[in-house]
Structures are given as structure tokens and as C-alpha cells.
Amino acid sequence: MHKILRLNSAGHPIDWINYQTAARLYYLNHIICECGSSSIRLRGGYNRLKRHRSFLNLNSIVSTNNINKLDYSAFTPPLVNTTLFKRDGHQCLYCGNIFSHNQLSRDHIIPLSKGGNDTWTNVVTSCKRCNNSKGARTPEDARMLLLAIPFIPSRVEYIILRGRTILADQMEFLISHIPKSSPIFQRYTKP
């Protein structure tokens, strides 16, 4: 089942929700706006008297009432390998080759043993061979150049990276909310 993109009342993407959460939001009248071109139809039970079956159409993108304000400037996504590898396009940022998830590892640019931190700006995707070759050295000490500068994904970029199956209308909406200079924008808008 596809996930539904949830927006706040200002139209900013918040997160992915499942269809059960979306149905509850529809039922509680928390949906203030729908957009997108695709929908999911949930079928309920039959009316005992009229024999009509109930149904609920859930749109692929919904905007909801929000009590809590989101501070987009203070957002730092959790650092997990799956999202890190997607951020870097499953490419080893030392040798440049593309690898499957199980052939990749998280490399600390400034090693933890030398005071480096486990943060988005200090980690890159590395194949296991390059990571072992670099060891507990900086890229300069190991004479290994980085192919890209690590960055912290914005809230919207993080939502894209977390999405497993993103529908076309959802992707179009999300892409419109990230700058054209973003590596993620460039990766997902290639012809």
C-alpha cells in the first residue's frame, strides 16, 4: 500500500503516513486540503438496511490542521545508513562506483578516533574496500579525494530519501519544494 504525503496547514511537507492514519484524519475532519492526482479507495462494510457498501477515498497528498508549528530551520534528520546511502546515490564517494546496500558502509571523514563526530557533514557513503583502505585516517592523510561534499538533507529532501515508493504526483510536489542546486533535485529530475 502506498504511503500518503502529509502537509501542514501552510502546505509544507511533514512526513509520510499510512492509510490507517489518513483514514483517521479524514474521520476526525483534520483534512483541510487535498492535492495530487492519485487516490486510494478504502471499502468498508455494508449498510444493513440499504445494502450499500461504504467507502472512503484517500488522496495521495493531504494537508492537515496542525497545532504544533514546525521550525524548518532547526530540523536535523536522524542519521541512518539507509538514508545516508540514498543521499549519496549508493555511490562510494571515494572510488565513484555504485554499490548495493550491503556492499556499502558509513565512513567518517574525520575519524571518531581523531575527534570526528557522527554527523551528516562528517560522514559519506563508502564501499567497504575504500573504507578499509582509508582506515582511521583523514582523506588527505590517506591520499583519497572526496567526490562530493557531504550535506544535511532538508526536511523535504529527507522525506524524499525516506520514501520507498513515491507516486508521480507526490514526487512532483516534493521536488517543487527543494532548490534546483540540491544534488537530490538533480538526481530525481534527470530525463
Image (tube, rainbow, N blue to C red):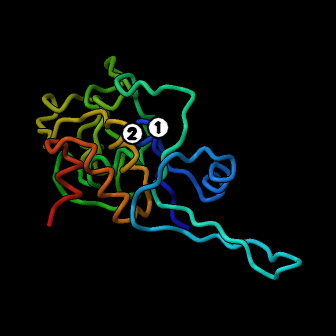
> Could you tell me residue 41's position as x and y percent?
59, 71
Farthest residue to the right: give it: 48
Left or right: residue 150 versus residue 102 is left
Residue beneath the point at 64% across and 51% down:
21
Judge by depth and name the residue closer to the eye, 180 or 79.
180
Residue beneath the point at 48% across and 25% down:
69
Q: Quadrant of the N terminus?
A: bottom right
Left or right: residue 117 versus residue 26 is left
Q: Residues within 10 Å of mark 1 (few under 14, many from 20)?
A: some
Residue beneath the point at 19% across and 59% down:
189
Residue beneath the point at 15% across and 28% down:
141
Q: Residues within 10 Å of mark 2 (few under 14, many from 20)?
A: some
Q: Can the viewer see residue 109?
A: yes
Left or right: residue 189 versus residue 124 is left
Q: Which residue is mark 2?
A: 12
Under mark 1, the amino acid is Ser
Secondary structure of residue under mark 2: loop
Q: Quadrant of the C terminus?
A: bottom left
Picture quadrant where residue 55 is located: bottom right
Under mark 2, the amino acid is His
Farthest residue to the top: give it: 115
Secondary structure of residue under mark 1: loop
For marks 2 and 1, give the CA distance: 7 Å
Q: Is residue 142 above or below residue 127?
A: above
- Which numbered circle lies on residue 9? 1
> Could you tell me residue 111's position as x and y percent?
31, 27
Please name which of the two marks, 2 or 1, marks the residue nearer to the observer: 1
